[in-house]
Amino acid sequence: MKFILHTFISIFFCTIICITARVNAQAVYPVINGEYRNIPAGECMERLEKETGYHFYFDTTGFDSLKVDLSIRSAPLSQALDMIFANTTYKYSIYDRQVFITKDIAVITALPGDFFEKRVSRSDSVQTRYIITSVGEEEDKPKDNTSENKLYEIGIKTSAPLQGVAKIAGYIKDVSTGEPVPGAAVFVEKLKISVNSDQFGYYSITLPKGKHLINIQSLGKRDTWRQVMLYGDGSLNVDMKDHVLSLKAVVISAKKASNINSLQMGVEKVDIRTIKQIPVVFGEADVLRVIQTLPGVKTVGEASTGFNVRGGSADQNLILFNDATVYNPSHFFGFFSAFNPEVVSSVELYKSSIPAKYGGRLSSVLDVESREGNKKKIAGSAGIGLLTSRLNIEGPLIRDRTSFILGGRATYANWLLKYLPDEYKNSKASFYDINLLLSHKINDKNDLYLTAYMSNDLFNLNSDTVYGYGNKNIVLKWKHVFNNKFQTLFSAGYDSYGYRIYSDNNEVNAYDMKFNISQSNIKFHFNYFVNSKHTLDFGLSSIYYTLHPGSFQPRGAKSLVIPDIIDKEQALESALYLTEKYNITPQFSAQAGIRFSLYNYLGPQTIYRYAEGIPKEENNITDTLLYGKGKFINTYNGPEYRISLRYAVTDNFSVKAGYNSMRQYIHTLSNTTAMAPTDIWKLSDPNIRPQYGDQLSIGLYKNFRSNTIETSVETYYRKMQDVPDYKSGAQLVLNHHIETDVFGTNGKAYGVELMIKKLTGKLNGWISYTWSRTFLQMNDSTKGLVINRGEYYPANYDKPHDVTFVGNYRFSHRFSLSLNTTYSTGRPITIPIGKYFYAGSMRALYSDRNAYRIPDYFKVDLSMNIEGNHKVKQKTHNSWTFGVYNMLGRKNPYSVYFVSENGVINGYKLSIFGAAIFYANFNIRF
Amino acid sequence: MKDFIKNKYIWLAALLIITELCCKERYNLPQEVAANRYLVVEGFINGGADSTFIRLSRTANPADSAIIQAESGAIVSVEGEDGNSFYLNETEKGKYAAGILPFNNNIKYRVNITTGNGSKYVSDFVSIQRTPQIDSISWNRESNGVQIYANTHDPQNDTRYYSWGFTETWEFHSAYISRWEYRNKKMVLRSYPDSLYTCWQSYTSPNIIIGSTAKLSEDIVYLQPLTFIPQDSWKIGSRYSILVRQRALSKGAYEYFENLRKNSEQLGSIFDPQPSTSIGNIRCVNNPSEIVLGYIYSSTEVEKRIFISRSEVPKWQYVFFCEEISVKNVPDSLEQAFGGGAYLPTDDVRSSVTGIIERYVGSSKSCVDCTLRGTNKRPDFW
């Protein structure tokens, strides 16, 4: 059925030349009955073909840009076709049982009267035909001419036969603001060639020369396409429109096939529009909370933005904000994430196919990308919520070339703390964060981007002790395009995180404690599109860490505190990587990456040596080594492999497999279950080995109903080595020889993740189910006391069953309802299995570690989003969000614990949110 | 525009109904049972002029009601590095004691135990820590109560780790003095009216209170919190006393208690550590993998007592609410009011003219008889 042009031409001429004409003006056509609602013209023709038994001939290029929305009742074929092609440039003609559909000029099925007198050579005819098609495309008709039905000619036009491939590259931008659209899928469905735009909206695709229909799709944007006639390399910039504000009854049902066609697996991308729809506690749109609803991602509880990906601990996630490493992504004891939803454009979580350009963490990469400022006009938004207020201003500094966004959030949360349990009643908390984003287009080949971020938290938990922490990040990126095939991205940045604890109530003991980690990093990333089959990514990066593990100093003149400062640590982590993407056939493609990482622990430093074969303890120190400034103390290195394969069985079904290995040289030391703001980081050194992990995963992806419903099954098995764990009663803060309290454990994790996702239509959202297990093991008595007799025991975040439903139903363009439901198995805890009397009270004798579970978790949240009117020309657009968090008011346990009170052991169940919480948010855009 | 946002916000605030956000509920101990009943050794080798007590018990199942599963019939001794052993006698079930022992301060000692089933246990050798005197016990009137502190220092900068225990004792009174007694259907004058009016109660803290000066340049403990008496508590209703006992600890003992405290008293926050059983410095000789609970250390103990009178504490408003009844001096009425024993007579009401007792007043037993809430035996230090 899908004939290419040549077939069409030959049939056309055969018809004309070989067959005797038979004028068929009064022919009786079959009668058509049916509903043809919002389907592409091609599909409509297929159906007509089935119904009538006629053959339809047409050029598929651009044909599907025509949509059919008709109800046909007892009309003969000719009348049906009249209806379908009314007000279009298409013409049709029917000859025998064949229908020819052409643009602008109908095929004449009868021979002209003077045919046998006038000789027409074949080559002349081709020439003529050629002109016919191009005339129709190029004709400048402002009324109907959108960029979608225009034919773009790329390269130098030639009439010579087109051979080989050519490359198209360009930027994808938002039409109204000029902001780039990152992560947009650019693909030619027929050829199963697909690429994604990078974070600057830049894409590059290699196609065989000739005519193509290029589809461009991105979350939150209206799907679009471009018809191109590719003669040679060239550029094509694409503007995309937002889809929610469009009030025209355009139904978006085109192919969301990128999950099938892309090579990546275990990647979840969520755009900010989806994030904002999901109900969250206090109505503060929260990037990390949404990540926690995805399959394979777990959290220990509500008061923690730390998350666990496929059985990894919370410090095994690399959290990037425009390539800047954010060490503590949370505010307010972990109730909020540190990312301002107003400046975020999308978040992407890599769970298994981690690109070789990323490294340094074992479990996942969370890539938070910001928007770029409006390049056309000054605009802004403001929001008022229960706990925070936001203000953002953006706009051009130089129109169409330089733009900025300045965003800030601040809190007034103290009132909320009065509702916390008694032991926190007199607490105080405040935080703020500031984002500054600049982008500047030097010329077509060079762009500069600057991201600056700062956050700060200050709180005390019903005591005289004040805690404060904050992130500071700055990163400058320079993008240079050598040519369509080769481009580079250079970035340099500085990231820092630190916390501080002080108390001055008791003047003799008044102290000031500080911890700080900072890193300076540079990255060179190159992208080389060799040809349509091969793409190379390569680069190198280097990070220089400076870590102040802790200082403890007197505060005030009367304090007797002895200053105690632990030697600062420094290290250099470098990596070199290369990825090759190879499209072996349109169905089968592979990507192989290797990353070689090299870690040097640097002086000045004091290193203790311990006796071999016995646990590292203070009295086993055999030697103390002093290293001078800049000396290489020790080096760890090794390759990391990143391999993924994809086989597309059909257009909407593919199988993928992947293997990756990772190395991690920097660790969080924390013996609390949740990620606490006072956790410290530690660099690998001769006594603390780097963590190593690898993962094997297989996935099946199938799309239904014209790719509007995506389903996937992914399964994985991973192993981890040298994951730090702590001796009972470990002293982690201000420990001069922390290796005596830490030992390496091994872990294994496996699971199956199922997901059904619908991202278009009135009802959209996803359902995910995860079955997964995570186990750790400590069986080496030369490192310390073995746990649970050296058997595998479940990790704190081992929650075997996890079901999440996230849904949004759009009643109208102004009103939508969102529902978020989560069920999961309770997390493991250690419980008393006996009691004994000691020091005046009953004390608990604890079971094996994590041998028991807290009750299961179940929560339903609901929110309503009300948009103001959609008139384009008004000063402000506003919207409301109302919601209820934990609608059922279920007292979901956060923890179960046992304390000795007045001589007896009492058990308690602590819930963070024990009731339904109502909230409202007001947002305004100007 | 600004006003608009403001107005809407007020409306919004009115819409909000926030109930309690967070909650803590009782949770029953799961009925899981340990495979064994492990030996628990508690006590310390008293290096001062006082007796040494070692208590042996066994762990119990969570559901067991008996408080202490005493371990009787063991042979317990304190053994020095010099080979000298001092045996302890079982004075009551599971409690082993020896009088003042002639320890040599320059050597270390350990505890040897042989239980009735033949298992042998031994602690690590520990040296005798000398405890410095308590400098003072101070207190501070705070807005919602009285906080009591300990202060001490070691001029040798040598002690560094401390533990405290305390016993509170307080005097309190009934609401009314009972001058009369209803005995054998007759009113008679009470011979010791004060025996029902003045009583004492005491409380020994079961909590572990430890402190360290290891991070300070001088070995000074300043304002170490011991206990807090909440506003208008009956403890300072009349007169209050606290006896504070202080012991020096070794670093190991301090860490053991710190760990025990973290695992049994300080849980329940958002950022809890993983709880675990604290393992001390005692091991089973026959079976090294057997769990033995407890930590043996050696120290001396010093004490200090202070008194706080109600008059010293500004605005202490402890009130004991009681109501009086008034009964006609008629045998039937008196029998009805005081015959059951629920009410006790306190005083008489005489006619101003004749001086004859017209009525008796009285109050409920709990308002009159302080022995229901304490003991009327005056402590010897009072």
Image (spheres, rainbow, N blue to C red):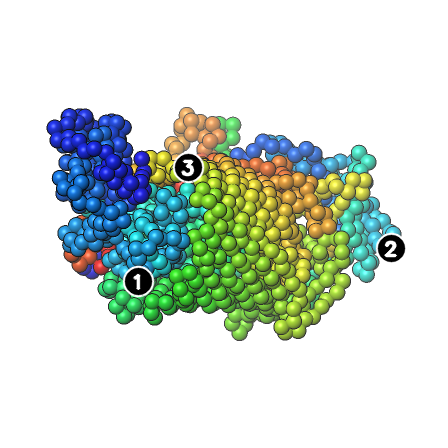
Counting from the top left corner in percent of width and height, residue B8 is at 21, 52
Which is more N-terminal, label 1 or label 3? 1
Residue plotted at (30% across, 55% down): A159
Query: At label 2, which amino acid type do we have?
Result: Asp
Examine the image and state in which quarter residue A630 appears. Answer: bottom right
In the shown orientation, is residue A628 left or right of residue B357? Answer: right
- Which residue in the structure is indicated by mark 2? B82
Which label was assigned to residue A373?
1
Residue plotted at (36% across, 48% down): A187
- Which residue in the structure is indicated by mark 3? A650
Q: CA distance from mark 3 to mark 1?
A: 40 Å
Question: How many numbered circles does the render carry?
Answer: 3
B82 and B284: which one is in front?
B284
Asked if residue B304 shows in the view, the reply is no
Examine the image and state in which quarter residue B353 appears. Answer: top left
Q: Residues within 10 Å of mark 3 (few under 14, many from 20)?
A: few
Say if labels 3 and 2 share a chain.
Answer: no
Counting from the top left corner in percent of width and height, residue A818 is at 31, 41
Q: Chain of mark 2?
A: B
